[in-house]
């Protein structure tokens, strides 16, 4: 493991005022979103959409890295340039989702375990040869009366550690992404409790395998009430509780922390990040790695009128800029 290389990649990824754009939706997820908007679910349509995202002029002012899916990392623009070469020209780090989605956790009704460890070293080596410098592995947890169970948190944490170890041996920065789902009517306090417990379990397993903590990025959900909760969380509460939780449950020498948007509204995700930075200074780099909260406007516009690439790109750039401003506590409506 080359620790300097890992730290170098992370410092480029979390350098203010930039963040990461996630465009690594699996075929299933991407197709579902296309279906809802009446877009044909074909490889060519997915390519066309991703080309639009990757080629936004000046996106590199706000975006330091993009996370791609296996299909996307192998694709080319209409005029024959590889997506990877476009990102490299812009100085954007190439990331890759390497988990293979979710399976059922045996004997735990409704709980999920992440798949994809088999053959991961070979896949990572191939992505590295293609130019990828960081990877992502996501686990999900549902809050309900009896979940997430200790087993679910422990099993997923073990996988995070094994994945992170293999990444670091190849000098690829592992993004470790435990996502506490926003679905449900739980309170922000309950979300705090679950997030805190899960972070303790995740870092305990990472430490057991001697993972180099300054050489990983934690990608996480915010501490926030459930989507159907009676009491909605305001940005100040989300910011206060999230920062407190990380200060108490994330090692201070972590390479960086980035957020997923997880179904929050676009503006909500921006305001929450902005509020955290207004409470700074923070002990770790903290920025965004949003998918939907940056893509929504562009996707809807393109779906309605695939010829109007320019407007879709303007919307993507604007959303990236808003979150870039929020990542330094400078967002203005
Ligand atoms: P969302 O911001 O849409 O949650 O996507 C981020 C991500 O990478 C989820 O794994």
Image: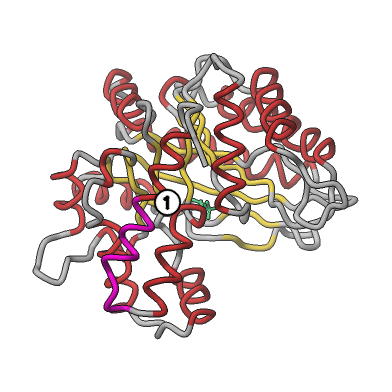
The N terminus lies in quadrant = top left
248 and 132: which one is in front?
A: 248
How far across and how far down the image is residue 68, in percent?
A: 35, 55
**Main SS, magenta residues:** helix
Q: Is residue 89 magenta?
A: no
Count all numbered tags in the image, as a single digit: 1
How far across and how far down the image is residue 224, in percent?
A: 73, 41
Residue at point 84%, 48% (across, down):
186
Placement of 8 over or under 179, stated as above or below = above
Residue numbers of the magenta segment: 306-317
Q: Is residue 309 magenta?
A: yes
Placement of 119 over or under 19, stated as above or below = below
How far across and how far down the image is residue 29, in percent?
A: 51, 69
How far across and how far down the image is residue 249, in percent?
A: 68, 22
Q: Which residue is mark 1?
A: 22
302 and 175: which one is in front?
A: 302
187 and 145: which one is in front?
A: 187
């Amino acid at each position: 493991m080359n620790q300097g290389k890992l730290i170098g990649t992370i410092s480029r990824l979390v350098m203010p005022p930039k963040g990461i754009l996630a465009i690594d939706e699996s075929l299933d997820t991407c197709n579902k979103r296309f279906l809802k908007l009446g877009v044909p679910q074909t490889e060519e349509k997915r390519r066309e959409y991703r080309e639009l995202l990757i080629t936004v002029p000046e996106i590199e002012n706000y975006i330091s890295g993009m996370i791609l899916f296996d299909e996307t990392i192998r694709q080319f623009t209409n005029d024959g340039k590889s997506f990877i070469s476009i990102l490299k020209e812009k100085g954007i780090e190439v990331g890759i989702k390497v988990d293979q989605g979710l399976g059922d956790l045996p004997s735990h009704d409704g709980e999920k375990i992440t798949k994809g460890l088999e053959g991961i070293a070979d896949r990572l080596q191939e992505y590295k040869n293609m130019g990828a410098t960081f990877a992502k592995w996501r686990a999900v947890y549902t809050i309900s009366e009896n979940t997430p169970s200790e087993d679910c948190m422990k099993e997923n944490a073990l996988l995070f550690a094994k994945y992170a170890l293999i990444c670091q041996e190849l000098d690829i920065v592992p993004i470790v992404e435990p996502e506490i789902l926003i679905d449900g009517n739980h309170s922000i306090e309950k979300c705090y409790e679950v997030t805190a417990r899960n972070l303790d379990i995740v870092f305990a397993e990472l430490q057991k395998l001697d993972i180099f903590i300054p050489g990983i990025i934690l990608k996480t959900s915010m501490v926030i009430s459930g989507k159907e909760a009676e009491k909605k969380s305001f940005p100040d509460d989300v910011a206060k509780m999230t920062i407190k939780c990380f200060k108490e449950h994330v090692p201070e020498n972590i390479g960086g922390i980035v957020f997923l948007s997880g179904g929050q509204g676009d503006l909500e995700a921006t305001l929450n990040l902005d509020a955290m930075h207004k409470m700074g200074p923070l002990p770790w780099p903290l920025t965004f790695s949003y998918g939907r909260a940056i893509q929504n406007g562009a996707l809807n516009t393109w779906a309605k009128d695939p010829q109007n690439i320019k407007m879709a790109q303007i919307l993507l750039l604007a959303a990236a800029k808003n979150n870039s401003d929020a990542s330094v506590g400078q967002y203005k409506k």
